[in-house]
Amino acid sequence: MKNIILSTLVITFLSGCSGETKDGWTDLFNGKDFTGWVQRGEAEYKVENREIIGISKADTPNSFLCTEKDYGDLSSSLN
């Protein structure tokens, strides 16, 4: 059940991401591979149908898939 919830959240957040857009947003996921990402932990991550699938491993600490760069909120730079 945790895998389904995690996968749904990741897919919802990252679906359709593929590069920088003209309005200042940066897409984080290219839909093909983990370029620009680093894995922290022992879970298995794979790309299927342009979606990130995360599979946790029993008896291991939490795992994360993180961007290599830090990103911020555009609204904070508008003030």
Image: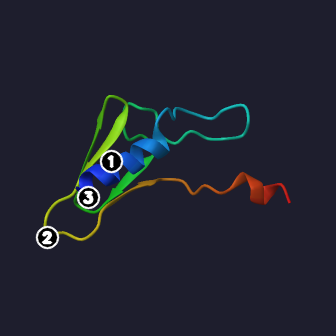
Q: Rate crowding at label 2 as few (under 14), some (14 to 19) or many (20 or more) other CA atoms within 10 Å.
A: few
Disc 2 designates what residue?
Answer: 59
Q: Rate crowding at label 3 as few (under 14), some (14 to 19) or many (20 or more) other CA atoms within 10 Å.
A: few
Disc 3 designates what residue?
Answer: 2
Left or right: 53 in relation to 59 = right
Residue 34, image x, y percentages: 38, 41
In the structure shown, which secondary structural element does the residue marked by tag 2 occupy? loop
First in sequence: mark 2 vs mark 1? 1
Left or right: 74 in relation to 17 = right
For marks 1 and 3, give the CA distance: 8 Å
Q: Quadrant of the N terminus?
A: bottom left
Amino acid at dot 3: Lys
Residue visible at 37% across and 31% down in the picture: 50
Q: Nearer the viewer, mark 2 or mark 3?
A: 3
Residue 48, image x, y percentages: 29, 32
Amino acid at dot 2: Asp
Which of 55 and 44 lies nearest the eye of the viewer? 55
Q: Nearer the viewer, mark 2 or mark 1?
A: 1
Q: How many marks?
A: 3
In the structure shown, which secondary structural element does the residue marked by tag 3 occupy? helix
Residue visible at 24% across and 71% down in the picture: 61
Return the mark for residue 7.
Answer: 1
Amino acid at dot 1: Ser
Residue 40, image x, y percentages: 33, 61
In the structure shown, which secondary structural element does the residue marked by tag 1 occupy? helix
Return the mark for residue 73.
Answer: none
First in sequence: mark 1 vs mark 3? 3
Q: Quadrant of the C terminus?
A: bottom right
Q: Rate crowding at label 1 as few (under 14), some (14 to 19) or many (20 or more) other CA atoms within 10 Å.
A: some
| Residue 70 figure quarter | bottom right
